[in-house]
Image (cartoon, helix red, strand yellow):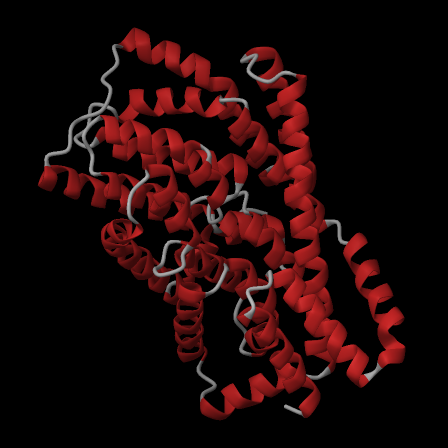
């Protein structure tokens, strides 16, 4: 760790202290480092970074999934899915809370974003639960916890970024997230059932067979989005990027022609919103590539590897330490910061220890999603508290047992790799 790399981290720390966004923090720190150490290399470095970024076909999938999520949220397609899930689970004790979990699993198969889930369909879920007599804090907590399924079950925007950073297969990462996503939904549903009986929460909407049939027919076009998306990827008909484009086109088709909830004005709004979201992601990606280039040139990863191997060469202890560190980081830092700054530093050590990149990618994405719901700075906590118009302290109190469930599942995924790798190893 020479003076130059210490200068880089000092500049970044200063930017964090003055609350500068992560993308600008990495950009300013990286440019300052180059100007101080090798000012003549500035043009060449940017040429390499932009060349790598624009030639990265993998990253094209992310804006397509962002666009599809915005179409689904804006076109009120989620209303149809909510009615369908109500018909399936409404008669259960705590039925609407159970619907909250199920619809997050279904919706995650379309968007791949926890934020899109919580801020989109989460609004409807929280309002409905409050109307039925659920505590506002519990309504917000289960909405935040269930939203974490989004980036675990495919498709997943964080997994796309991880694939770009590590070179792992997006298709296998998506397949690796299927079982963990379903398991998390089942565990949350069990917890909801326990709490519902304990607090005597009401059953949800009970439909007749005819009403459920109508709700199913209305939801079917939206549900086919998941089949088109995942079916296209897993049958090998198209790549994840192509599947994202196909599913986005289908989402526009059903929104405009079948449900008729999206006109030219709404579509233009979605395009502008998606462009803004994509620009933010592109800036993050570009600056992270620049930062990673410097980390690689200064051999920071090798220094970290030597330090860790000097303590232990046991991959199970290493995975435990990584999980603890990333969980702690998730309590105080944004997911994008963790993924773009810290993951590239430890990837060489992951490869050196023989840990499967797909297995590691799934557990690290799961770990970061727990961070979204972890006090005190989990982003989902602030989003759902704002939607539910309740104090964040109450949401934190309710979500702690759910976070404990997620951490327990994380440990299972870490030390029983077959849970993650079962589908990737059996589907070619």
Question: Which one is nearer the viewer's eye here, 55 or 335?
Answer: 335
Say above or below: 247 vs 144. Answer: above
Q: Is residue 289 visible?
A: yes
**Residue 281, percent across and down?**
65, 51
Q: How many marks?
A: 0
Give the residue at the far front of this rendering.
18
**Residue 419, percent across and down?**
40, 55
Q: Is residue 55 visible?
A: no
Which quadrant would residue 343 be assigned to in this image?
Answer: bottom right
**Residue 121, percent across and down?**
42, 32
Residue at 79% from the left image edge and 64% from the top image edge: 49
Say above or below: 271 vs 31. Answer: above
Say above or below: 5 vs 197. Answer: below
Q: Is residue 75 left or right of residue 105?
A: right
Residue at 47% from the left image edge and 86% from the top image edge: 313
In which quadrant will I find the N terminus?
Answer: bottom right
Which quadrant would residue 50 be assigned to in this image?
Answer: bottom right
Q: Is residue 319 left or right of residue 295?
A: left
Residue at 18% from the left image edge and 39% from the top image edge: 193
Question: Which one is nearer the viewer's eye here, 404 or 141?
Answer: 141
**Residue 275, percent across and down?**
69, 39
Residue at 9% from the left image edge and 41% from the top image edge: 198
Say above or below: 52 vs 300. Answer: above
Question: Which one is nearer the viewer's eye here, 58 or 46?
Answer: 46
């Amino acid at each position: 760790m020479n003076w130059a790399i210490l200068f880089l981290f000092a500049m970044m720390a200063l930017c964090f202290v003055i609350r500068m966004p992560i993308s600008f923090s990495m950009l300013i720190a990286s440019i300052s480092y180059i100007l101080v150490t090798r000012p003549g290399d500035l043009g060449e470095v940017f040429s390499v970074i932009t060349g790598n970024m624009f030639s990265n076909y993998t990253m094209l999938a992310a804006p397509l999934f962002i666009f599809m999520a915005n179409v689904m949220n804006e076109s009120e397609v989620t209303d149809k899915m909510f009615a369908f899930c109500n018909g399936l689970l409404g008669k259960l004790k705590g039925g609407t809370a159970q619907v909250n979990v199920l619809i997050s699993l279904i919706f995650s198969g379309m968007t791949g974003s926890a934020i899109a889930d919580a801020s989109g369909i989460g609004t409807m879920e929280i309002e409905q639960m409050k109307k039925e007599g659920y505590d506002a804090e519990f309504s917000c907590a289960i909405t935040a916890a269930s939203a974490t399924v989004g980036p675990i079950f495919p498709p997943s925007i964080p997994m796309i970024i991880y694939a770009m950073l590590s070179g792992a297969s997006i298709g296998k990462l998506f397949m690796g997230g299927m079982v963990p996503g379903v398991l998390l939904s089942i565990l949350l549903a069990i917890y909801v059932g326990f709490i519902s009986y304990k607090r005597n929460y009401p059953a949800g909407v009970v439909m007749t067979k005819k009403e459920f049939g109508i709700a199913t027919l209305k939801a079917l076009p939206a549900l086919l989005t998941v089949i088109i998306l995942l079916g296209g990827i897993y049958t090998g008909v198209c790549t994840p990027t192509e599947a994202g484009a196909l599913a986005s086109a289908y989402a526009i088709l059903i929104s405009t022609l079948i449900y008729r909830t999206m006109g030219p004005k709404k579509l233009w709004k979605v395009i502008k919103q998606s462009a803004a979201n994509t620009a933010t992601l592109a800036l993050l990606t570009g600056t992270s590539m620049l930062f990673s280039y410097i980390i690689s040139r200064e051999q920071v990863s090798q220094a970290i590897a030597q330090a860790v191997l000097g303590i232990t060469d046991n991959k199970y202890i290493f995975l435990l330490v990584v999980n603890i560190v990333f969980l702690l980081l998730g309590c105080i830092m944004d997911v994008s910061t963790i993924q773009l700054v810290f993951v590239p530093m430890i990837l060489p050590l992951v490869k050196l220890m023989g840990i499967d990149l797909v297995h590691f990618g799934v557990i690290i994405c799961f770990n970061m999603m727990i961070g979204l719901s972890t006090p005190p700075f989990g982003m989902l906590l602030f989003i759902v508290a704002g939607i539910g118009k309740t104090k964040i302290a109450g949401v934190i109190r309710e979500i702690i047992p759910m976070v404990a469930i997620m951490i327990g599942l994380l440990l299972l995924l870490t030390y029983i790799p077959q849970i993650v790798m079962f589908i990737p190893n059996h589907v070619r």
